[in-house]
Image (cartoon, grey):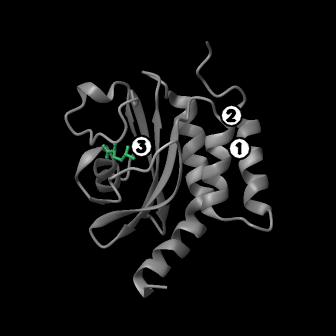
Amino acid sequence: MDRSLREPLDELQAVRAVCEGDSADAQHIVDHLYETVPHYSWVGIYVLEGADLVLGPWRGPQATEHVRIPVGTGVCGAAAASGETEIVDDVNSDPRYLACFAATRSEIVVPIHFAETVIGEIDIDSDQPNAFDRRDQSFLEQVAVLLAPATRELQNSLSTGA
Ligand code: SME
């Protein structure tokens, strides 16, 4: 089975279309990724609040207990600390991994930047080992650019308690 993105550019166009729609928000993009890419088994956005990542919109079969992760902790915290994408081919052999779902085998975490600062990240788990490659990375890094304004809004509403 081809576990890769079939046409990353088409996928990106589709995500752009979601962004330009009337309801261009992070939940719609999360839903779109979850529904259209078969090896994306759980999709979530974490938003940086102070020194913690706070879970925002997500889509998947189950909720995660990790709704607040300190920067520097877990794969998510590592990506937030470095500002670089993390790909974990086998979560069971990465000591940083914070387990959420028994079925997860691999994970990608892609930081979302605003004004050259990390403001959040996309976290995707796959039930397949080695599910994520450079095409996912490149695609999701471009999705992260599209997500920056919505993530900034989420961050602002966290800080104002709105
Ligand atoms: N596995 C992540 C925690 C978040 S859950 O995957 C939703 C980590 O190691 O940081």
Q: What element carries label 2?
A: helix
Please tell me which residue is depicted at 37% across the width and 37% down the height of the picture: 101
Q: Is mark 1 on a helix, strand or loop?
A: helix
Q: Residue 85 shows which numbered tag? A: 3
Instruction: Give the residue type at disc 2.
Output: Pro
Q: Which residue corresponds to mark 2?
A: 8
In what quadrant of the picture does the N terminus appear? top right
* Mark 1–mark 2 CB contact (< 8 Å): yes
Instruction: Give the residue type at disc 1.
Output: Leu
User: Residue 59: horizontal and vertical position, in percent?
Assistant: 55, 49
Image region (quadrant) for ligand 1 = top left
Q: In this view, does 85 lie above or below 56?
A: above
Of 25 and 133, the residue lying toward us: 25
Q: Residue 12 shows which numbered tag? A: 1
Instruction: Give the residue type at disc 3.
Output: Thr
Furthest residue in direction left, as rendered? 95
